[in-house]
DNA sequence: CTGAAAGCGCTTACAG
DNA sequence: CTGAAAGCGCTTACAG
């Protein structure tokens, strides 16, 4: 089913059919227009985006390069981005990067399809020079993490504030010996969160000793192990800030295994506010990261850039402390 | 950067460059071949998939039509499908269907891009005749749910077995008064699971009374409310089968709110085995649904169909009971 | 108001 | 071993 078919059926040239079907009304008599529209409908004509993209030099498609979008945080981001793109008429071609496939290849595939821009959600690759190299060139890019060697607009949340909110909440409840289970230390997000967290503790006259900082890798199991390690090292700790909700769940489990009751014996603050946080026992106090809004914003900014508009280099969405029952006075 | 550029740089016609770059070796002298390859590398030539797709009449792309892939189950499926497609050289164009955008439009977009086939993961639309209508035509489709009015190959798991496994596990532990919190009743998956569940109870001489069946909508909150309702109606129930892990978490919460301890006062079996199931307190006994394998299989079958092979109409992957600490003898 | 030409970047027979 | 032609399905100036 091509333009030629609907043109033949309505007795005009295919160029005229093209104009009418593209809403170029007024360029044709009402009756001709009517005939063409009806023919297209009768035939079930669906324009060919590849042909259109070829001549227009725009695929009306964005590429999404994501770490591992079976992760609840990433998938929220990706879904919101996809919807925002769709609502502005753009398709979303998704490419995941992981151990088996390097970033070069994933980006190259996106370039072959001539996506109009790329959205990056790949914090695990923030230090990977190959990703930076693959992303060189004039193609618009918006990212939620920094990209090695490139200056691309970043949208996300203020990680330092996240750390500050967690610390101030616990300090406000009266905690003094506060520990933290972080994500991988080399990650920007972890460093920024630690910065805010540390500063708040220092400002309150309770500087954070190194032994109250234990590293995990975002997983349940690492959170559990790290929480055990933290409490083995310093059993006097009365509160823990976990760098994400998954780690927090692991910590909850560790605490339970040690016979500690929450929040009486130990408070836990998570980070993310994933869907299950509210339904844990006890419900998890956490800093809400607006993944959905971030995805929507990122897609919108990318589309703006594709449309030729100037966008700011950094766009931070507000985070918010959600107080539930996993924290209380010590 | 087009073929003409690399042809110009290596002193051949662009058609010859095309052949060499497509691995049509032997068709050209080694030295020419070498020159062309080097020119392409120097120029950073990336073939244009739209142009290629137009002439080959294949976009080398599949469409994925999903309900709401921020759901952990769906996102696992989609990710695995995307990876399987990528490993066979196919891009994945993702389209989500939800309240705001009807299925017609989402499918139409996919058709515009001339995807070579469509993967459907939209159980909430299994009764929607518009989706069925939109999917008519010769385009290969593989789905994890049935599609109204169409006979498309389905890949998934055996839902009746899932219900049977849950029932037999609880019966084996000695439970007799067993209740269940189901997903939406009109869904096939719910009906099949109920069938297996009911039959196993009946076979054990413990037919399921209607008041021990309460409907939820897959959400945490609905699971919580439904569990309360179940225990209000029949406080003698000693075990609950939840139709997914999210409902199970809600039920855990309800049980906790009623002062019941797990598994001593009540056992709970979930379904799915989402990542957090193992880390709940207590760890959740659940029937594992192989979402990842399903996604991989679905994509593989779709690609096979696209490749012209015949595939079976129904492909069920095995489910598996994972026993943890949320169940015990009554 | 409508049509014919040119061209987007490729691949694929077909010549030479 | 290499090139020229035709064509995939469109859009966009440009004529008439």
Image (cartoon, coloured by chain):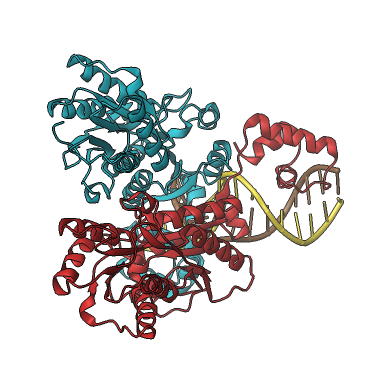
Chain colours: A cyan, B red, C yellow, D brown
Residue A186 percent location from the top left of the image = 43, 24
Q: Quadrant of residue D7?
A: bottom right
A32 is higher (above) or lower (below) than A229: below
Residue A73 percent location from the top left of the image = 34, 44
A248 is higher (above) or lower (below) than B70: above
Is residue B139 visible from the viewing direction of this image? no
Q: Quadrant of residue A254?
A: top left
Residue A225 percent location from the top left of the image = 40, 36
B230 is higher (above) or lower (below) than D7: below
Q: How many marks?
A: 0
* Residue at image coords 55%, 63%: B297
Residue A205 percent location from the top left of the image = 18, 14
Q: Quadrant of residue B179?
A: bottom left
Quadrant in which the N terminus of chain B is drawn = top right
* Residue closer to the observer: A178 or B34: A178
* Residue closer to the observer: B162 or B149: B162
Is residue B176 visible from the viewing direction of this image? yes
Whether residue A190 sits left or right of residue B212 in the image: it is: right
* Residue closer to the observer: B288 or B124: B288
* Residue closer to the observer: B224 or D13: B224
Quadrant in which the C terminus of chain B is drawn = bottom left
Whether residue A36 sits left or right of residue A3 in the image: it is: left
* Residue at image coords 48%, 50%: A53
* Residue at image coords 45%, 57%: B77
């Amino acid at each position: 089913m091509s333009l030629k078919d609907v043109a033949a059926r309505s007795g005009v040239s295919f160029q005229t059919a093209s104009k009418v079907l593209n809403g170029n009304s007024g360029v044709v008599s009402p009756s001709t227009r009517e005939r063409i529209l009806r023919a297209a409908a009768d035939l079930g004509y669906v324009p060919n985006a590849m042909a259109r993209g070829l001549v227009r030099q725009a695929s009306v498609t964005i590429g999404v390069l994501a770490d591992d979008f079976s992760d609840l945080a990433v998938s929220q981001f990706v879904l919101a981005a996809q919807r925002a793109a769709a609502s502005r008429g753009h398709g979303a071609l998704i490419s995941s990067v992981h151990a088996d496939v390097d970033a070069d290849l994933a980006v190259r595939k996106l370039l072959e399809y001539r996506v109009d821009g790329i959205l990056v959600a790949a914090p695990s690759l923030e230090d990977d020079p190959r990703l930076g190299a693959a992303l060189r060139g004039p193609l618009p890019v918006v990212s939620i993490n920094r990209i090695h060697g490139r200056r691309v607009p970043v949208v996300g949340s203020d990680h330092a504030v996240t750390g500050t909110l967690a610390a101030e909440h616990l300090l406000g409840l009266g905690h003094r010996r506060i520990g933290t289970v972080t994500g991988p230390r080399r990650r920007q997000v972890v460093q920024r969160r630690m910065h805010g967290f540390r500063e708040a503790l220092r400002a309150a006259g309770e500087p954070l000793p190194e032994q109250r900082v234990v590293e995990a890798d975002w997983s349940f199991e690492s959170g559990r192990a790290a929480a055990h390690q933290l409490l083995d090292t310093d059993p006097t700790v009365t509160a823990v800030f976990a760098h994400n909700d998954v780690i927090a769940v692991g910590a909850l489990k560790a605490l339970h295994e040690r016979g500690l009751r929450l929040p009486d014996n130990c408070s836990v603050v998570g980070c993310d506010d994933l869907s299950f946080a509210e339904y844990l026992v006890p419900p998890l106090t956490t800093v809400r990261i607006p993944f959905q809004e971030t995805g929507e914003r990122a897609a919108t900014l990318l589309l703006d850039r594709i449309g030729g508009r100037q966008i700011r280099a950094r766009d931070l969405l507000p985070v918010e402390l959600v107080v539930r029952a996993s924290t209380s006075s010590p």
